[in-house]
Amino acid sequence: MKGKIEAIDELLDMMDKAELMIDLAYSSLIYDNIEIAKEVAELEDLVDQKNRSIQRLAVEDLLEGDLAVNEALTIIRLSQSTEMIADAAMEIADVELRDIELHPIIKDAIRESDVVFTRAQVSPKSILAGKTLGELELASETGMWVIAMRDAARWLYGPNEDTRVDPGDILYVRGPADSEEGFMKLASGEKREF
């Protein structure tokens, strides 16, 4: 039973990474940012490894009798489908990696969707600075969800409620288009309350 749980945990982690890859891939296009596109490529390698690992675990558990044939097949199919989503995200990011200029209409269409991806650097005078994401409750207060962060040294994907926001951090967020302006004002320090 241990392997079955491990395979499912790995699959859920793989699905989270594939979803993040889509968000980052579109962000790389919107902001013409090759660094974000490179991060998508690194995540794609990780998802490929997870796909192979999950399939191996499912077959081992099938042979040991811990999984029924239908359960093993379901896990393998979900893993393969998630890997295809990650591949699609990589194809989107590849446009940026190959330095292909997008037509302005495509960029505008991405920006005009109901959900926007945006980035903001946190000002030292921002009310976000020095607080954890849990303290800020950004998703409920602003509608914007932090999908990734970057400081001077590293990237952080899927930050949690214990993740601290420091001055100078760059936040990559996703949320409703009508929440973007308010969030940007909070990050810059122009707006001092939710």
Image (cartoon, rainbow, N blue to C red):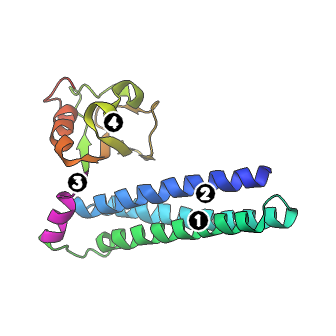
Q: Is residue 114 magenta?
A: yes
The reply to whether discs 1 and 2 touch (Cβ–Cβ < 8 Å) is: yes
Q: CA distance from mark 1 to mark 3?
A: 28 Å
Residue 14, quarter of picture: bottom right
Q: Secondary structure at mark 3?
A: loop
Three-letter amino acid code at the position of disc 4: Ala
Say left or right for 52 vs 124: right
Q: At x 57% / y 68%, what residue is drawn? A: 48
The reply to whether discs 2 and 3 touch (Cβ–Cβ < 8 Å) is: no
Q: CA distance from mark 1 to mark 4?
A: 28 Å
Q: Which residue is mark 4?
A: 139
Q: Secondary structure at mark 1?
A: helix
Q: At x 44% / y 40%, what residue is drawn? A: 159
- The total of numbered circles placed on residues is 4
Three-letter amino acid code at the position of disc 1: Leu
Mark number, residue 78? 1
The reply to whether discs 1 and 4 touch (Cβ–Cβ < 8 Å) is: no
In front: 171, or 176? 176
Q: CA distance from mark 4 to mark 3?
A: 16 Å
Three-letter amino acid code at the position of disc 2: Leu
Alpha-carbon neighbours of circle 2 within 10 Å: few (<14), some, or many (≥20)?
Answer: many
Q: Where is residue 166 drawn, in percent x and y?
A: 34, 31
Q: Which residue is mark 3?
A: 114
Which span is picked out in magenta?
105-116
Mark number, residue 11? 2
Q: Earlier in the sequence, mark 1 or mark 2?
A: 2
Q: Earlier in the sequence, mark 1 or mark 4?
A: 1
